[in-house]
Image (cartoon, grey):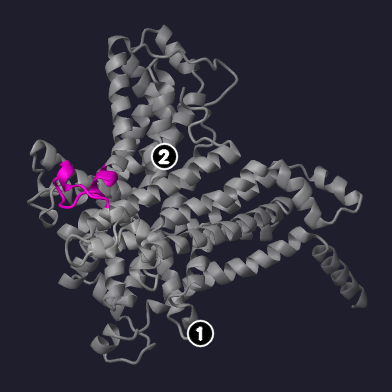
Amino acid sequence: MGNKKGQLSHRLRAFCSKPSNLLLVLFFVVLFCLSVLPLLTMLSNMFTVHIGTEKRLLGLDVGAFTWNHFQRLFSVSEWSKVNFWVPLKNSLIMASGAGILGIIIGGVVAWFVTRSNMKYKKFISSVFLFPYMMPAWTLALFWVNLFQNSKVGGGNVGMVESIFGICMPEWFVFGLFPMIIVIALHYSPFAYLLIGGILKNMDATLEESATILKASRWKIIRRITLPMVMPAVLSTFLLIFSSGFSSYTVPVFLGSSVKMFTLSTKMRALINAGYEGQGYIIAFVSIALGCFILGLNQWFTGKRKSYTTVTGKSGQVSLVNLKKANTPISIFLCVYVLFFAIMPLVSFALESVIRQPGNYSLSNMTLHFWMGTEYSAYETGMIAGILRNPTMWQALGRQVLLALVVGLIVGTCGILIGYSCARTRGSKLSHIVESMAFFPYLMPAMAFGTIYLAVATTEQFKFLFGTFALLILVAAVKFLPFASRSGINSMLQVSPEIEEAAMVVGVPWWKRMVKILFPIQKSSILSGYLLPVISVMREVALFTLLVPKPRYLLTTMLFSFNETGYSQYGSAVTLLIVLIVILINTLTNKLTGASLDKGIGG
């Protein structure tokens, strides 16, 4: 008996002597508390009565068990139709349409860049990615500024009607059609990157053989090229579908005016109206679908692992000669990428300096919305310009502080998780921690925020409700998957022998990390710090239910301006956010040497 205790004690000391093991245990406990327990709290809230509307309607005590939320939401009544089934249908149509259109746009551009002799490839490849760098809601707001007209959307006039006198129909300006277009435009660069990477590195032997046998170019594409890239196409569709399904900001801008709800917007509406239980059920449906989509994607890509597209043979691809079509196609794509890269910024700049919407004459322009004082307003009810507005500066300061704190926490945790998982590769605990760190990625941002809302409204954690600490907590957990994945990949590239050599001469663990491992993987580590900063600066859906008031953060302040009719202030704030995101993204590329389109275009 004593011998067994001695062996157990020896094993425990040996386990604790390795920093990677202690870090694994630490992160297992932390991630369990911050990911699993909040999810369980939300699940329990699906079956309980909440204070306010639910208590009044059901006549039960707060916290009592009930099936009423499920019965009302999943029944065949008018209530369930309006609050679940129709929003679900809208979300499915929006996500499916965006996935198909995004693949068509991104795939076509990827083929022209990688497989043809099209002109201006490097320029098109670089600028085409710009809409993906911008938040999706900026394209939605650009669409409204462009096509809004006197017949829909409150009577304001957009650029198209003002300049050309063309009044677009309501379905074109608001509703499912523009939602699909905007989400597809935002994620088409994502399709371009995935499909373009496959096309760039694909073995050209089969295509060359078909060319020798006099097969037509269209037949080669249809019978050889498309089947070879089909795994990437289906994977891309699933990822765009999942992102589109959970989109919140695009439906808010393009659906609210015509009462077009999706599951994300209906979730917020139900929670704000006091139907928390039904809102949590919708959040769970979104999370379950996200997990299913990712699992389906993993299953499909795993099933096709033996489908070889890169070999050691015939790496040289013979480019298709576009002949007379080269110039028109090149010019068209240049105009396309410039329009969606530059015109949104031009639109926001114009909308932020006009007094009366729809009138773009010089006499109607003013810098009041940027630099005016509250007392220089030309009509009652106006507020100071955003550059002289203390509320705006406070919101920007909080957003920047939140981004920096979250970036510091997430970047550091990502490195430590990467180190601990890489050094204990193959162990069950390593696999569990790696999976738990990636788990928040499966959850839509709005649903993830809803999980922490459920926690912050409990008796034990009500001290967190509406606090800055809650925003730090939810953002750090939500954006941890990117940093942890980057950390794991970077640490797997470093041979343990380098660290072991330092251990032999007695270098302590913290000095090995700072003096050896950090400098070797500097670029990946910097990415792990900077990418969460970009994500926080552009995020809306994650915080919309958690901020104490709309003007607490710059991104939520934008929605406050647009909802209260101050669209000029909203455009100015949007332009400011986009410029900040572009600046941080450029800084990231300069410091890390990373480029999204490297190896694809030009």
Chain-order first, disc 1 or disc 2: 2
Instruction: Say whether residue 355 is magenta.
Output: yes
Residue behind mark 1: 460
Quadrant for the N terminus in the image: bottom right
Determine the residue positioned at 8% across, 39% down. Answer: 166
Please, what is the three-letter code of the amino acid marked with disc 2?
A: Phe
Q: Which mark is residue 561?
A: none
Horizontal and vertical percent for residue 407?
A: 56, 56
Determine the residue positioned at 20% across, 61% down. Answer: 565
Horizontal and vertical percent for residue 489?
A: 63, 45
Describe residue 196's horizontal placement relative to residue 407 as left or right.
left
Instruction: Say whether residue 406 is magenta.
Output: no
* Mark 1 crowd level (few <14, some 14–19, many ≥20, 10 Å Cα): few
Does any portion of residue 397 appear in the rendered image?
A: yes
Q: Which mark is residue 190?
A: 2
Horizontal and vertical percent for residue 222?
A: 34, 23
Q: Secondary structure at mark 2?
A: helix
Determine the residue positioned at 19% across, 67% down. Answer: 82
Horizontal and vertical percent for residue 140?
A: 27, 49
Q: Is residue 353 above or below residue 449?
A: above
Describe residue 39's horizontal placement relative to residue 184 as left or right.
right
Q: Which residues are magenta?
A: 347-367
Residue 399 placement: quadrant: bottom left
Determine the residue positioned at 88% across, 68% down. Answer: 10
